[in-house]
Every structure is written in C-alpha cells, then in structure tokens.
Image (cartoon, rainbow, N blue to C red):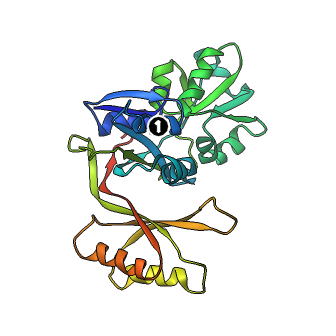
Amino acid sequence: MKIVYLGPKATFSHYTVTKAFPNGDIEPRMTIPECLDAVLDGTADVAVVPLENALEGSVTITIDYLVHEAKLPIQGEINTPIQQHLMVHPQWENDWKEIQMVYSHSHAIAQCHKFLHKELKGVPSENSSSTAGAAQYVLHNKDVKIAAIASEMAAREYGLSIVRPNIQDYSHNMTRFIAVSREAVDLSEAQAKREGMKTTLMIELPDDYAGALHQVLSAFSWRKLNLSKIESRPMKTGLGNYFFLVDIDMAMDDVLLPGTIQELEALGCKVTVLGSYRSLVIEGMNG
C-alpha cells in the first residue's frame, strides 16, 4: 500500500503517517491537492492530509478540495499532538536572538504568535509550504541569520539546532489528520493510545428560511446524537450559499443515523456521507 503525505520529510504529516501506517510505503507530495490527486489518479492508495488544528481551526484547502474536486471518502482520522520548536543552523545557535527572519507554515507561525511577539518582536516571518520545508530552507541558507519553526523530527532530519523548544502558545495544540482512499483503510497496526468512531456528514440546506438550521440540529438532538463539530463552508455558487459539515461521535449504524438522514432529506436537505471511520489519537514526538 502506497501512502502519500504533505512533505517534504519530517513534517507533522510525515510523523503521523509513520505512526498510523508503520509498515506502509510512504512518499511525500508538496501540496495537499497533489496528495489527493495521487489517490484520484491511482498513483497512491491513501493520502494523509491535515484537516483541523486545535488552535487555528480548519485547513480549508483540504475541506474544499475534498468537497468540490476530489470527492474521496474519509477512511480514518489520526489526531497528533503538536510541539513547535524554534531552530537555526548550528553556526547561529548562540546568536539566535539576532535572526532576521522566521520561516514556517502559516498555521505554525500563528500557533506561536505569543512567543514571536515577546521574544522576537519586530522580526518578520514568512510563510513556507510546510514546517519541514522551512527547516530545509534554513539548512540551505546557512550564511543568513534565519530560523524555522518546525518539529523535533525536522531538526534531526535537516541538522538544525533547537534553540527554544515548545514555543506554541498553548500546550494542548493538536492537529487532526484524515486518511482518504477509494477503499477501506486498515488502521489496526496504528500506534495509537486512544480510539473511537466518528461519522462526517455534508448537509446542504434547502432554500433559506427562518429556522432551517434549527430544524436540522433538532434531528440530531432528539436522538441524543453528540455532534463534536459543526462548520459552514461556502458552496462557491454565490454569496450567502453555504453547506454544513457535521461530525457525529459514532459509527454509521442501521437505525439512528439512517433515520436522521431520512428526516433531513424530508426537510429538503441534501445529505452526503463523507465517511464513517475510526478516530485515533497518537503520541506526540516528545511523548
């Protein structure tokens, strides 16, 4: 089984794949759409991509590409604790407060805003395609006083020195990754510390009218179905047109969820099951 992930090597996606598929044939791609396209065109069996971060919210490119372009089912989810570190080329280890630029993925920079504002106030930051890509860039530009925000795995992979560990604003930082594939995915060998089940629905409301969303949520409420997330995204068909993504903390069954879907459809909603899958929590790199 070939699994692709958001590269280059030593991204949090890479770490997540090694824990979820310890015996898989893994290979990086440089963007999230490239990962999903690889499954669509058959050059890969599974793509593992980030979907949501506890501090920064949803990764909208993943949601929008899945809904509007790739249309691949979610076959599993892996939740990974995230520890962000400030790293430099070893020759600047003692002069790290003199760095002139910080590179990382936009989400990682946002996750470390408090540290950057306090410790490196006035130092500009620049977005990279990934945290590991930022670390790679620092390695290849060793004559410039620059730093990257990335993982411990990236520091080892690219020979950088961590000068300030765990600089994320909040200790409970975690990213939710999803495995998408045309076929069911076996996560039985995943190195997980906790697991559960989840089902994700995409709900398109009928023509806008007062109380429409309330009626939708009531279909879950009276059945005592726990919603762990509800999010709206634009349909891209015109201003004010949205669909809703709903995560339910249970697997697809024979009664409750089919009954809910039938009730929503009776209300005029269009309901699409994006996946019913195992949800895993793995250890962080330092844990």
Relative to residue 259, is residue 147 depicted above or below? above
Q: Residue furthest right?
A: 122
Task: Kindly tell me whether residue 134 is visible in this rendering.
Answer: yes
Element carrying mark 1: helix
Nearest the camera: 107 or 61? Answer: 61
> Mark 1 is on which residue type?
Asp
Q: Which residue is mark 1?
A: 37
Relative to residue 253, is residue 126 depicted above or below? above
Task: Kindly tell me whether residue 164 is visible in this rendering.
Answer: no
Q: Residues within 10 Å of mark 1 (few under 14, many from 20)?
A: some
Taking the image as shown, residue 70 lies to the left or right of residue 131, namely left
Nearest the camera: 10 or 67? Answer: 67
Nearest the camera: 175 or 234? Answer: 234
* Residue 74 image point, x, y percent: 37, 51
Q: Quadrant of residue 47?
A: top left
* Residue 178 image point, x, y percent: 40, 48
At horizontal 42% and vertical 34% (from top left) the residue drawn is: 41
Q: Quadrant of the N terminus?
A: top left
At horizontal 24% and vertical 76% (from top left) the residue drawn is: 255
Relative to residue 187, is residue 131 depicted above or below? above
* Residue 182 image point, x, y percent: 33, 45
Circle count: 1
Nearest the camera: 197 or 41? Answer: 41
Q: Quadrant of the C terminus?
A: top left
Relative to residue 11, is residue 237 depicted above or below? below
* Residue 135 image point, x, y percent: 57, 25
